[in-house]
Amino acid sequence: MAVEGTSVALPQFLKKIELIKQGAEARVYRGSFLGKPTIVKERFPKLYRHPLLDEKLTHRRTVQEVRSILRCRKAGISAPVVYFVDYTSHCIFLEDIVGSITVRDHIASTQLSSAQKSPEEHLDQLAQKMGQILAKMHDEDVVHGDLTTSNMLLKAGAESGETELVLIDFGLSYISALPEDKGVDMYVLEKAFLSTHPNTEALFEKLLKAYAASSKKSHAVIKKLDEVRLRGRKRSMVG
Amino acid sequence: MTVVIGFEGSANKIGVGIVRDGEVLSNPRRTYITPPGQGFLPSETARHHRSVILTVLKEALEEAGLKPADVDCVAYTKGPGMGAPLVTVALVARTVAQLWGKPLLGVNHCIGHIEMGRLITQANNPTVLYVSGGNTQVIAYSERRYRIFGETIDIAVGNCLDRFARVIKISNDPSPGYNIEQMAKKGTQYVELPYTVKGMDVSFSGILSYIEEAAGKMLKCNQCTAEDLCFSLQEILFSMLVEITERAMAHCSSQEVLIVGGVGCNLRLQEMMGVMCKERGAKLFATDESFCIDNGAMIAQAGWEMFRSGQTTELSDSWITQRYRTDEVEVTWRD
Ligand SMILES: Nc1ncnc2c1ncn2[C@@H]1O[C@H](COP(=O)(O)OP(=O)(O)O)[C@@H](O)[C@H]1O
Ligand SMILES: [Mg+2]
């Protein structure tokens, strides 16, 4: 299937491939592009918001997503390959992480099933991996902006049987060296993690420990994380 | 049949409501209104509540056509909220519970909003956007807790609106939010403001300081009107709220939204949320000001659920607390 990248050809292309999900802000399609299994992420106009705001946000997010993925990949952090971008229709063509599942679904099913030999140990390893990859990402000054277990994929390694962690959904990301920004990034993850996966406080502690151990700059980030948490607890709730 | 009376006064509204098995029998309320440019202070708000609470209580009973003997349980707001008003209302609730010989029940204010919204709209298991003067949270239920997926990392959306109203001296009668909403309808020009979303969390303090700083200047040199500012502020704030709600829905695979809390009766917010829901084939549930804004019946309704599941509060435990997170409460009345 040939795509010229013109805004005329794109809508037709999208019609022929399978819509798999309406995500948080985009429609996600699965198909084949130049013979490769491909995910197309389409940031369609959000009619609820003012057109000027919509155009600004959509454009900025498409640009940021591509930029941060490239930056991560250059640093050896797993993220899907970007095949093609169309800034008119705000479509990003990404490598399909074939056979992957979200970390969210993986944790949920591991917690449920007794099939796994030692679910605790298995999840501990995963938490460690998450901490390490996030430390590496922050060392590159990439702040993800939307860290949740829905935005991390697990893919079974080709021969080793080792699972690989892949980061996705960089639309809210930006570049910053500030410990405050990275601390808020971890705060957002902590809250999303604990509310999505009840009774995983100990598991998240392991993630943070691995994060702290993996980066020389982590000390300042963890300090900021503590500050942001405290601010949250002290916040007035009047009204 | 179970009849619960609820006392609410955690902020500038004082209300007493009576609920009988899902039916709101009465729900009178008074609001402490301050002059333009002024917020409400704890001790003065408490004084206001003290001066009217017995009248409101009498109205609640009369309107419901009930005698104290018909009441099974006395519920009151335990928190979160302002200390002095909370104490005042809890004191009255404790007193009548002892006079009438009825059990007491301390209720989380946020849970009150959620349970009232569920009762009125019959939403089954919605993603809840709770927006008021003191709170901004995106909540979903799982495993016996209302879990907070997203929230403000600084000030609440209602607080942002109220403080903006004070800056340009908009009337607090009936509420600053209502007046901003009316003025926004006449706004035509979209003024760019900062937009700060962090995953499922939001931040409003940057927008507030930006507009506090810019408003005076822009109005003085006729760059825009006060109506334009109201319009633009609403558009920005509500877009952020709709966005984090949608993100939580995608994350939790939810197809229902319920808006509760005082800001939730804003029709522009409801309209925007409705458009988002339509785009993803989801359903929106919202209520009008009688139930969105703090009221006694919401405390009675949450109290009803708690009481029916076997909970009561001992007199010695009937304190109040200014900070009380939604996810601290074990939800004993849902599967
Ligand atoms: N490269 C990919 N390979 C496989 N699945 C993907 C890929 N990108 C996204 N997905 C799936 O689509 C979902 C939504 O994509 P995401 O980039 O997070 O969009 P949104 O911003 O709308 O949340 C992900 O949670 C994941 O299940
Ligand atoms: Mg996502």
Image: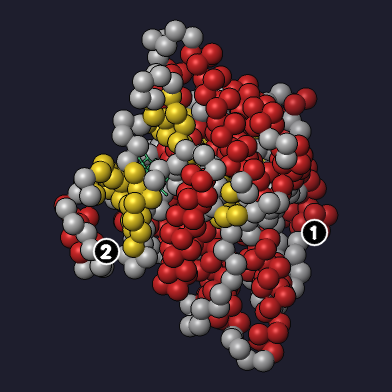
Residue A79: image tag: none
The residue at 53%/66% (across/down) is B236
Q: Quadrant of residue A218?
A: top right
- Locate residue B116, reporting x and y percent: 49, 44
The residue at 51%/46% (across/down) is A74
- Locate residue B79, reporting x and y percent: 69, 40
Do marks 1 and 2 share a subunit? no
Q: Tag 1: Cα neighbours inside 10 Å, few (<14), some, or many (≥20)?
A: some
Cα separation, mark 1 vs mark 2, equals 60 Å
Q: Is residue B25 left or right of residue B76?
A: left
Numbered disc in front, either 1 or 2: 2
What residue did someone put label 2 on? A5
Vertical arrangement, residue A195 with respect to residue B217, above or below = above
- The residue closer to the viewer here, A92 or A1, is A1
* Residue A125 shows in the view: yes
Q: Tag 2: Cα neighbours inside 10 Å, few (<14), some, or many (≥20)?
A: some
- The residue closer to the viewer here, A159 or B324, is A159
Is the CB of mark 2 within 8 Å of ligand 1?
A: no
Question: Callout 1, which amino acid?
Answer: Leu
- Locate residue B293, reporting x and y percent: 56, 55
The residue at 32%/41% (across/down) is A96
What residue did someone put label 1 on? B41
The residue at 53%/75% (across/down) is B231
Q: Is residue A44 left or right of residue B19?
A: left
Q: Chain of mark 1?
A: B
- The residue closer to the viewer here, B242 or B331, is B242
Seen from this angle, which residue lies furthest right?
A: B43
- The residue closer to the viewer here, A61 or B235, is A61
The secondary element bearing badge 2 is classed as loop
Q: Is residue A180 left or right of residue B279?
A: right
Q: Chain of mark 2?
A: A
